[in-house]
Each structure stands twice: as structure tokens, then as C-alpha cells.
């Protein structure tokens, strides 16, 4: 089990206040999604469609590539209902000039509460 994701069991619904950073991230993401929609030009396109989706991004960080992947696997294990649509990999500067950290960013969605269906595309292999 990941030390960053403690297991908590509660008997009643819990309402957690959203930190300002989460609210700011959501506003920024909606602004970027709106800009992406405005950038779609109907002129000069043929043979395809463009859609804009706002998936939840889960960022797992580690001091090594293996640790970042372990964190991502631990998160997936604790959120079995999540559908992973894509992932991105990055090595970024750490807290010192000679230190790097590794990030795995998962674009995920969760099933609709009414229908149980996932939104968005996922890969399906030929049968």
C-alpha cells in the first residue's frame, strides 16, 4: 500500500472542502477546454472529427522511474472503478539542481452514477 494514499473507511458520507488549488485548477482546465473548442476551425478539415474531453488527471511522483510507476499502480489499485484513458511520462527538476523526480500522469474517468457506463474512449483489441 502506498504511504501517500492512506486507506480510510467511513460509515457516512464525508464532505471535504476543496482546496483553493483544486478550484483554481478546475477553472484553468475549463478555460483551456473552452480555448481548445474555439480553436477548432470548420474550414479546411476533412475526413475526421475533433472532440475536447476534460478527464481527471492523477499525477504520481517518485524519486525514481520505478517509484513513480509503483505510485501509479498503487493509486489504480485503490481506485478500481477508474478507467485509465492515457498516461504521460516526465522527468522534471527536483528540489535541487542535481536531483530529478519522475512523474506519471494518468488521464482517468469514473463511471456515470446513473448508468454505470464510462465516458470517453478506451482501447479495445481485435477479438
Image (spheres, helix red, strand yellow):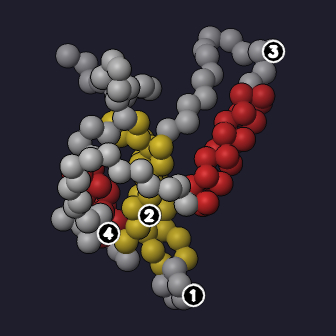
Kindly check if marks 1 and 3 are in contact, taking CB atoms under 8 A apart as contact: no
Q: Residue lying at the far right in this picture: please name it.
A: 43
Q: Position of residue 88 (x, y in %)?
A: 46, 51
Question: Residue at the location (72% across, 15% down)?
Answer: 45
Q: Secondary structure at mark 1?
A: loop
Residue at numbered disc 2: 103
Residue 85 figure quarter: top left
Categorize mark 2 by other alpha carbons within 10 Å: few (<14), some (14-19), many (20+).
many
**Eye-nearest disc, 4 or 3:** 4
Nearer-N-terminus badge (1/3): 3
Residue located beneath label 3 in the image: 43
Q: Is residue 66 above or below residue 119?
A: below
Q: Which quarter of the figure is the N terminus placed in?
A: bottom left
Q: Residue at x 33, y 36 (%)?
A: 83
Q: Position of residue 28 (x, y in %)?
A: 68, 48
Give the vertical position of 122 relative to 32 (above or below).
above
Spatial CA span between label 4 and label 1: 25 Å
Amino acid at each position: 500500500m502506498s504511504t501517500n494514499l492512506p486507506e480510510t473507511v467511513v460509515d457516512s458520507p464525508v464532505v471535504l472542502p476543496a482546496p483553493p488549488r483544486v478550484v483554481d485548477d478546475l477553472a484553468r482546465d475549463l478555460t483551456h477546454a473552452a480555448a481548445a473548442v474555439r480553436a477548432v476551425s470548420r474550414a479546411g478539415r476533412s475526413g475526421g472529427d475533433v472532440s475536447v474531453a476534460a478527464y481527471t488527471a492523477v499525477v504520481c511522483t517518485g524519486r525514481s522511474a520505478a517509484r513513480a510507476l509503483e505510485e501509479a499502480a498503487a493509486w489504480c489499485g485503490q481506485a478500481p472503478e477508474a478507467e485509465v484513458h492515457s498516461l504521460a511520462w516526465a522527468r522534471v527538476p527536483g528540489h535541487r539542481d542535481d536531483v530529478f523526480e519522475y512523474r506519471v500522469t494518468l488521464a482517468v474517468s469514473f463511471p456515470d452514477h446513473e448508468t454505470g457506463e464510462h465516458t470517453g474512449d478506451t482501447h479495445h483489441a481485435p477479438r
